[in-house]
Amino acid sequence: MLNNEERIAYQQTMILKAMREAADHKAEVERLRGYLARVKAEGLNSLAVARDYIEANRTDGINCPCCDQFAKEYKRKLGAEVVRFVIWLDRYCAEGKSLHVNDWSDVSSNRRGGGDYAKSAHWGLARLMPNADTGKRTSGLWQPTQLGRDFARGLRAIPKYVHLYNNQATRFSGPLVYASQSVGEGFDYAELMRRGDEC
């Protein structure tokens, strides 16, 4: 682990390197000069400087100047598993009730998928219910939101991508898509909506 002086020197070197690489981008250079001045004036003891630096660079990924942890904003696509999970919740979850994820079988393979269904929460399509059992990581109980129900029924479109930082949605991008456009190849949305016992 670097001491504070080594961190400051390293940070200054990285900022100067980035300034050289961004020579064609005047605004970026000015922003980096501001960070360099703050680092020189306040040192890395200022969490505000470190937070601002990470915030400005998290899209491409950056090592935290305080703890050296890699910080990055990830772009996730609305996947077929998320859509099928939300459709299942809409069909089988009574208003105000919740369903356990172990009761869901992925319609393509009769088994639950790799966990992408949990990303439904980032779009606001479903919510994981609170966990009362301290011996378990989560409750496993899910409930569709009104947006999730409307999306599953083809009444609302949502952005195709969610951007995640520290497992929190920071923004959305891409075209608006309906469930019927996102259910995946090999699946007929209309047929999926008609079926009862295979969801």
Image: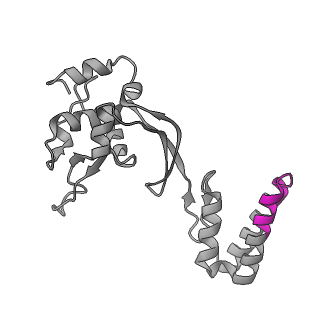
Image quadrant for the C terminus? top left
Q: Is 23 colored magenta in this rendering?
A: yes
Residue 43 x/y as whole percent: 69, 80
Per the picture, the main secondary structure of the magenta-coloured stretch is: helix
For residue 54, side relative to residue 163 (left or right):
right
Residue at the front extreme? 155
**Closest to the observer, 182 or 3:** 182
Q: Is residue 80 visible?
A: yes
Name the image colouring: one colour
State which region is magenta.
19-33
* Residue in view at x 14 percent, y 48 percent: 97
Question: Which quadrant is home to the N terminus?
Answer: bottom right
User: Which residue occupies 86% across, 51% down?
Assistant: 24
What percent of the width, then of the height, locates residue 58?
A: 60, 56
- Residue 69 versus residue 8 in the image, above or below: above
Q: Is residue 113 visible?
A: no
Residue 154, percent from left and from top: 33, 30
| Viewer-nearest residue: 23 or 147 | 147
Which image quarter: residue 157? top left
Depth order, front residue of 64/96: 96
